[in-house]
Amino acid sequence: MRTLPVLLLRLPLLVAIAASAALVVEYTNAGDPAFCGVTSGCFAVRMSPWSRLFGLAPLPSLGLAAYALLFGLTLVARRKSQHVLVASLAVLGGLFAALLLWVQQNVVGAFCAWCVAVDLSAIVAAVASVWVALRAWKDEGSVLLPQRKAVTGAWVTAAMLAVLVPFVWGRHPVEPPLPAVIQAESEPGKVTIVGFTDFECPFCRRMHPVLHGVAEQYGDRVKLVRKMMPLSGHPGAEPAALAYLCTPSPKREIVADQLYAADPEQLTRENIPKLLAEKAGLDADVLATCMKAPQTIADLERDKKLFEDLGGRGLPFTFVGKRVVLGFNPDRVEMAMTQELGGPRLSLPVWSMFLVLGVAFAFAVLVTLMTPSGDQDGDASKNERSPSA
């Protein structure tokens, strides 16, 4: 019973640290998810305003720092006032975690498994910290753990692994299979780039020369496919998307150049056929008729539905081979191309990460339980009993 409340405090904090580190990997990655798929609840939470504190700092980064600090305090707390400080901070963290669980349920409408792991761990740690503080308030020695270096070293090592291991595994993720619809666009021997776009979207306009440049750089080794996702806030996006779908394949890049470059006010159903007749050599009447055709409208709706089915929540949204690029990120596009052309890489399954962390956490607990209570390093320390949480 002496060690139980302290273990119930430290172990959840280690879980919160590891899960926060995994989320930091996800948030600093512009795609190619290591721990969360693009259709997962984690991705939905990540794309929500609640993923950043006041819209600035990513919550996982703040959480990682906060839980690492709190865990460090549990290692050095000796007096009852220090245990009360730990409990106060842990309770604040637990209350905030409960709020985030409520937000996922009622605001975002999706649960992030890694976020839930962090939040539930924070709540358990908050309860345990109060238990430790109450016992320490009556008797500081009642929460005394062995003070040997081996015990402290085991806990510090477990905490370091909780931070570092997710970053290592995040660099070598198991690549999820491509959705069947995206796979159907692929050609053997080529890297297929499938990009969802809106011709009026500023970031899509910036992404266009990037993708066009990649296609020119790699030539026959690349196949570029555009899928239409006109946003409701861009009135010219839908007419432009219909015009693009009506364009014969050989002229689609020329048409894309013109649609991205056009003033948004020019992108109307009446003006686009004239614009493309002048700039791309298309027949204006044929194009205008095609833009109204039920089949063209059905093709556009199919692209929109595909975007939703794939979990898209922002533009541009691009598949580079098996890898996903979120938003405007030229560096990530180039990195994805390099990885795709480089062939298979080392993949570390997530279960093996759990195994490594589980062994490290269990070892810390085992060393603690096997060391006699009050056992300390050094001759001078034998006369002291310094409680620790």
Image: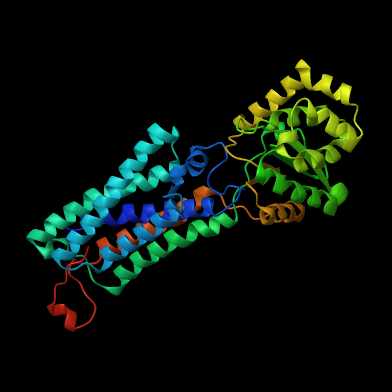
Along the line of sight, the residue nearer the viewer: 261 or 61: 261
Q: Is residue 238 left or right of residue 17?
A: right
Percent of width and height locating residue 267: 74, 33
Percent of width and height locating residue 105: 39, 33
- Residue 54 visible to an observer of this rendering: yes
Along the line of sight, the residue nearer the viewer: 360 or 207: 207
**Residue at the farthest bottom position:** 380
Along the line of sight, the residue nearer the viewer: 288 or 140: 288
Number of numbered markers: 0
- Seen at 60% across and 55% down, the residue is 172
- Residue 323 visible to an observer of this rendering: no
- Seen at 83% across and 19% down, the residue is 289
Along the line of sight, the residue nearer the viewer: 105 or 164: 105
Question: Which quadrant is home to the N terminus?
Answer: bottom left
Residue 227: image quadrant is top right
Percent of width and height locating residue 20: 43, 53
- Seen at 36% across and 67% down, the residue is 156
Percent of width and height locating residue 46: 50, 44
Residue 188: image quadrant is top right
Question: Which quadrant is home to the C terminus?
Answer: bottom left
**Residue at the farthest left position:** 138
Q: Is residue 377 left or right of residue 229?
A: left
- Seen at 59% across and 57% down, the residue is 171
Q: Is residue 253 above or below residue 244?
A: below
Q: Is residue 211 left or right of residue 283?
A: left
